[in-house]
Amino acid sequence: MSQYRKHALPMAIAIALSVFDASVSEATAQDAQPASASTLDQIVVTGTRSKDRTVLDSPVPIDVLTPEDLRAAGAVNGELGQALAALLPSFNFPRQSNSGGSDHVRAAQLRGMSPDQVLVLVNGKRFHTSALVNADTKIGRGTTPVDFNAIPISSIKRIEVLRDGAGAQYGSDAIAGVVNIILDDAPEGGEVTASYGAFHTDFKPTGRTITDGQSGFASAKFGARLGGDGGFVRAGIESNQHEPTNRAGFDQIPSWENQSPANLALQGKRNYAAGDPQSENYSGWVNAELPLADNVRAYAFGIYTQRRTIGDNYFRYPDSDANVPAIYPDGYRPESQGYNRDVNLTAGARGRIGEWDYDGSLTWGGNSFAYDLRNSVNVSLGPDSPTSFRIGKYEGTQSTANLDLSRSVEWGTTLYTVATGAEYRRETFRTYAGDPASYEVGPVAGAPIGAQAGGGLTPQDTANLSRHVGAAYLDISADLTERLFADAAARYEHYNDFGSAWTGKLSGRYAFTPNYALRGAISNNIRAPSLSQVGFESTSTGYGANGELVQGRVLSVNNPIARGLGATPLQPEKSRNISLGFTARLGEHFDASLDVYRIDVDHRVTLSETIATDGLESYILANYGVPGVQSVAFFTNAVDTRTRGAELVANYRHPAYGGNLTLTGTYSYNRTSIRKVRDTPPQLAALGADAVLFGLEERNTLTDAAPRQRGALTAKWDAPRWSLLGRLTRQGATTRVFDFGGGFVPTQTYAARWQLDAEVEWHATERLSLAIGGQNITDQYPTRSIADIAYAGNFPYDVISPIGVNGAYWYGRVRYTF
């Protein structure tokens, strides 16, 4: 345990108690009124260029989350992604294990779509994606997501989540929606927060009570005024530490392994690890604005995050082809190490020239991911093999220049808001080779080649790509009558590698009465394949035929091997979105919204099936001279999909017992179906009947691996001295399909589960609060996996269930504002 983890909580409690002792007399004299919990009248800036739209009268569904909401989510280790999953009706943030790079960068879904089909903004400016492709995960396989956990949760003033396609307004990637993170801009005061928690669970597969996953979180932020007329600087730092969890079962030794005395001696032991990776995260942020002259304000903001994570891989047995007994006489379990660095910087100016409001900015963002292995071996090198390797490094950057203009135009008796603008974006993606020992062929004939759990990237397979994107848009909106609001937007985008495209959106809201309204939108959107999807390559180990470990490669579409198997240049995804909603507000106490939608996506970018036919390895060696490739996958536009869904949000607010009671109910349903699958290329089909471009496993990834339904009921009571929260969530069912070839297709549906979260917060003084709480406090687990999926008892639970595999999590938090 690090010094931070050992001392952070006691120090935080000591500070809190000293502050409490100094200020308790001041607080007892005060009788503050409970703050209103309503955000319905909050003016939103996402989804429309009009400056007077609120959550309830927006023409598209928008959720607004406050810092109080995020704190009450009780997210493990202060993870923003997990907080959003607890609070939003259509947000899924699965935890992965033994999943290669996905152990280090978690992907999120909105409306059941792919993680890279949601656009993330910070203060309205595009945030960069990860440089790492999620190649070994189940949900979001083959995507390049935004790493939500790279954004410090303490930096946030509010989050606006637009649940609708918005490509005409914001550009590529906004197929499922937009998440706009507004940074804290308080011009004075500050806050210090510390929390500590751990999982404490009754783990039935081993009959043990386990306490692990200890997590420490600390943040501090402050603000100061700059110049006059509202200038400010707000800055903060954040630290997150999380110990690993392990929910592996007792090893029964897989039947395909050598049943030797050395291997059987490990039977009944916990040789594998399944759960959260160890992580250590540090971040800092700043948000500033300075008045320069009349109607001119300069602004700048930035986020820096670095994170080190350690994930687990499959155990290698003593008498195994994947072991060198001279190095590991008792077998070994490789560990992957990820070194993530994210930087995002923006500077700009806004003001007014004549009748036009303008906003011009420059943004630079990038992610660097270095991938290492330790406790591994390159078996082909024999006893001389090193045990630690640099597997490769991935870097992606995004530079954006924006100019946005808007004004009001009166035409007849109607006042229109006209907005127009242009954007230029340059994106880069570059990969670096791993250590030579991580991929080279050693002198041991017939032995597996490359580092176990992930062979290194070779110099021949590295990529250095860039692209230029130019765009211009026009947006016109107005209250056409007292009851009808309409918004029309059109956008032109040009990619130097994928050509040009037009997107458009028409949305509107019709109020039957001041309290009841219909809203709807129709749009088309695009998402160009990311540069990492074009150039990414990696080597990893996963399930193969009969459940055996297979060394496989993800190939770029430019790789000669992929081309020889029928890979073709990627095309942009194109979607058509339709939504219709109803909103109601009864007095000041109750409001509700129901939205239904359909999203059709053509040429969806996915990874192909993992191709592992009997003749593949010899075919690649004979035709391309590359040994040891047992399976391959490459990117393709093989499938068209249709997603249908519905979302219900209802809120009830009322004073109660000296405070405010808020009841919130949410329900979401989405179902993705396959509209069209393109034929397997003849080059691939020639390898055998099991060689298919898009089959059972990838169909399962898009349609059933994520939950179709999710519902939650939250009750929160706020008073001057106490805050109480309870949240009951029903996590929907999920289905896992493995296709091991030869008709062996293990399949299991994991039943829906109820999860109960709770928190009690005591406002000891006006400035000091103490809280205790728990997630999944009834210690629920998914359905136990069947024998064909449990991997000889080592993985008793599957990670695709949203309730996770860790059990109950308990935490305490102290917060002081000044």
Image: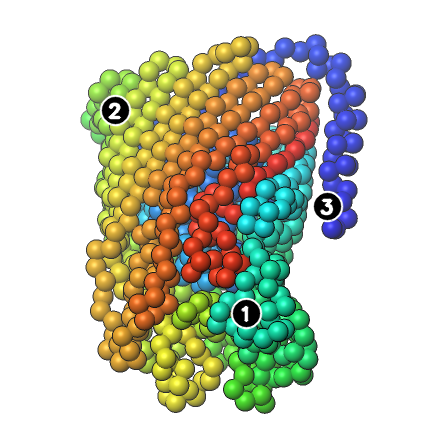
* Dot 2 alpha-carbon crowd within 10 angstroms: few under 14, some 14 to 19, many 20 or more: many
Residue topped by disc 2: 517
Pick whichever of labels 3 and 1 is earlier in the sequence: 3
Residue topped by disc 1: 453
Q: Which one is nearer the viewer's eye here, 10 or 528?
A: 10
Counting from the top left corner in percent of width and height, residue 597 is at: 26, 40
Q: CA distance from mark 2 to mark 1?
A: 55 Å
Q: Which one is nearer the viewer's eye here, 77 or 409?
A: 77
Do the CB atoms of the residues marked 3 and 2 lie less than 8 Å apart? no
Is the C terminus in the top left, top right, bottom left or bottom right quadrant? top right
Question: Relative to 245, does residue 710 appear above or below in the rendering?
Answer: above
Q: Which one is nearer the viewer's eye here, 736 or 101?
A: 736
Q: Which mark is residue 5?
A: 3
Question: Is residue 818 rendered to the left or right of residue 466?
Answer: right
Residue 126 visible in the displayed image: no
**Identity of the residue drawn at 59% across and 89% down:** 443
Q: Amino acid at mark 3?
A: Arg
Do the CB atoms of the residues marked 2 and 1 lie less than 8 Å apart? no
Q: CA distance from mark 3 to mark 2?
A: 52 Å
Secondary structure under tag 2 reads: strand
